[in-house]
């Protein structure tokens, strides 16, 4: 896509991509206070990023430095908690938050998110939505015991096709899987046959991997969109290489421009 087309589609986003997007992108290491579980305290999509309110300002500034020229990076709490990445889930179309989210928190999100993003509160007993749902802009994997009404809300708000599935034998698909529109990463102990079947079902390439020096809980160790990723500070160079490969972060500028235009 040409720079002129990007300017026409989104003039306020037509800026020179950061250096790491112009040449070779890298997954960026971060930590929240002393925790390397970046996916617990953040939620990243192609059209916005949520970061936990409070804690170390270094955490927020790491995300802001990489993203704020292109998408809003929003300080947030949900139900008064800072674990926004575990209780909320979303994509470029919408954001689902648990029933414990207050009206004030909902108003703050709506005021700061792009107008095209629909914010929806979900009445679901499995309230840690980020643990129970993994999604990109087209498909969602959900916990096998999620309410039927919740499944309908997911399909409607996020505009995705919903699949009830497990990652290996784990029902907490959001904890053991991370998806973008380019690919997905699942925990390292998932059998190859199961991974192939899941890949065929959601029509997305998958790879097994770990984060934070061997942790299977991928959802806590990695957050990613189509052109950026953040990993826990303990993540090794080998683990980062797997993240960059499956999410196609090398030479990410075209993917970033496409994702930003799609999000308009």
Image (cartoon, helix red, strand yellow):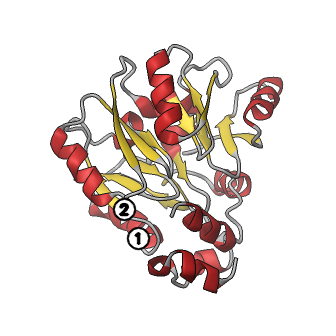
Q: Is residue 17 visible?
A: no
- The x and y percentages for residue 84 are 34, 42
Quarter of the image where one finds residue 195: top right
Q: Which numbered disc, 1 or 2, marks the residue that appears first in the sequence?
A: 1
Q: Is residue 258 visible?
A: yes
- The x and y percentages for residue 96 are 39, 38
- The x and y percentages for residue 134 are 55, 35
Q: Quadrant of the N terminus?
A: bottom right
- Residue at image location 51% in from the left, 75% down from the top: 10
Residue that badge 1 annotates: 68
Whole-Å distance between the Cαs marked 1 and 2? 6 Å
Look at the numbered disc 1 and give the secondary structure of its residue: loop
Q: Are marks 1 and 2 in contact (CB under 8 Å)?
A: yes
> Is residue 157 found left or right of 167 in the rendered image?
left
- Residue at image location 64% in from the left, 22% down from the top: 165
Between 92 and 189, the one lying in front of the other is 92
Q: Residues within 10 Å of mark 1 (few under 14, many from 20)?
A: some
Q: Residues within 10 Å of mark 2 (few under 14, many from 20)?
A: many
> Is residue 200 found left or right of 47 in the rendered image?
right
> Is residue 180 found left or right of 48 in the rendered image?
right
Residue that badge 2 annotates: 73
Look at the numbered disc 2 and give the secondary structure of its residue: strand
- The x and y percentages for residue 149 are 44, 19
Between 130 and 15, the one lying in front of the other is 15
- Residue at image location 68% in from the left, 22% down from the top: 168
- Residue at image location 59% in from the left, 75% down from the top: 20
Between 248 and 158, the one lying in front of the other is 158
């Amino acid at each position: 896509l040409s720079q002129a087309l990007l300017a026409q589609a989104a003039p306020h986003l037509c800026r020179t991509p950061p250096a790491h997007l112009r040449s070779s992108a890298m997954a960026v290491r971060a930590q929240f206070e002393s925790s390397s579980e970046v996916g617990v305290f953040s939620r990243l999509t192609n059209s916005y990023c949520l970061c936990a309110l409070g804690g170390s300002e270094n955490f927020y500034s790491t995300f802001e430095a990489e993203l704020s020229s292109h998408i809003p990076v929003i300080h947030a709490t949900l139900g008064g908690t800072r674990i926004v990445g575990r209780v909320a889930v979303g994509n470029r179309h919408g954001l689902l938050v648990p029933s414990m989210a207050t009206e004030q928190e909902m108003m703050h999100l709506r005021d700061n998110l792009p107008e095209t993003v629909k914010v929806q509160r979900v009445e679901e007993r499995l309230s840690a939505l980020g643990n129970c749902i993994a999604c990109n802009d087209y498909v969602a994997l959900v916990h096998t015991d999620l309410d039927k009404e919740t499944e309908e809300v997911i399909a409607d708000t996020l505009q995705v096709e919903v699949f009830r599935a497990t990652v290996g034998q784990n029902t907490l698909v959001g904890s053991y899987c991370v998806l973008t529109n380019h690919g997905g990463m699942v925990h390292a102990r998932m059998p190859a046959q199961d991974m192939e079947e899941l890949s065929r079902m959601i029509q997305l390439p998958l790879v097994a991997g770990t984060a934070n020096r061997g942790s299977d809980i991928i959802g806590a160790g990695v957050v990613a969109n189509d052109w950026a990723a953040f990993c826990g500070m303990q993540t090794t160079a080998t683990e980062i290489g797997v993240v960059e490969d499956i999410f196609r972060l090398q030479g990410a500028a075209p993917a970033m421009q496409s994702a930003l235009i799609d999000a308009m």
